[in-house]
Image (cartoon, rainbow, N blue to C red):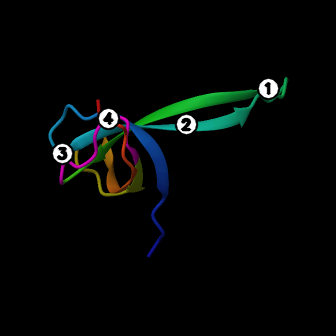
């Protein structure tokens, strides 16, 4: 069985039922000039327990397609955000 990719990111939206939007930030180098740039990707992930809230650092893993955009699953909450 193939290994599933797991990445870490910050929850930026939790307004949906059993779903969260997770932003993954990575750094790349510009091909010509060499300057480091930040790139952000946003993934919709399935959160069965509605446990993750905005600002939490979570780990997400690849999963089966659950809807048109939802192909990731929240595996665990790594760090809670400070609630206001």
Alpha carbon distance from label 4 to label 1: 31 Å
* Among the two numbered marks 1 and 2 on one chain, the one whose residue lies closer to the N terminus: 2
| Label 1 sits on residue | 35
| Label 4 sits on residue | 54
The label number, if any, that marks residue 46 in the structure image: none
Instruction: Specify the quadrant of the image occupied by residue 82.
Output: top left
Q: Is disc 1 in contact with disc 2, using a CB cutoff of under 8 Å?
A: no
| Label 3 sits on residue | 18
List x then y, in percent, for residue 70. 29, 43
* Among the two numbered marks 2 and 3 on one chain, the one whose residue lies closer to the N terminus: 3
Q: Is disc 3 in contact with disc 4, using a CB cutoff of under 8 Å?
A: no
Alpha carbon distance from label 2 to label 4: 16 Å
| Label 2 sits on residue | 25
**Camera-side mark, 2 or 4:** 4
Task: Please give the name of the residue rendered at 49% of the width and 52% of the height, measured from the top-left corner.
Answer: 7
Disc 3 element: loop
Disc 4 element: loop
Q: Is residue 51 magenta?
A: yes
* Among the two numbered marks 2 and 4 on one chain, the one whose residue lies closer to the N terminus: 2
Looking at the image, is 18 positioned above or below residue 15? below
Q: Is disc 2 in contact with disc 4, using a CB cutoff of under 8 Å?
A: no
């Amino acid at each position: 069985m193939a290994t599933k990719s797991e990445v870490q990111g910050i929850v930026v939206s939790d307004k949906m039922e059993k779903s969260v939007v997770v932003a993954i930030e990575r750094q790349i180098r510009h091909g010509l000039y060499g300057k480091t740039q930040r790139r952000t990707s946003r993934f919709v992930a399935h959160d069965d327990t509605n446990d993750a809230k905005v600002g939490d650092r979570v780990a997400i893993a690849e999963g089966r397609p659950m809807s048109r955009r939802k192909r990731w699953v929240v595996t665990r909450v790594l760090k809670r955000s400070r609630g206001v």
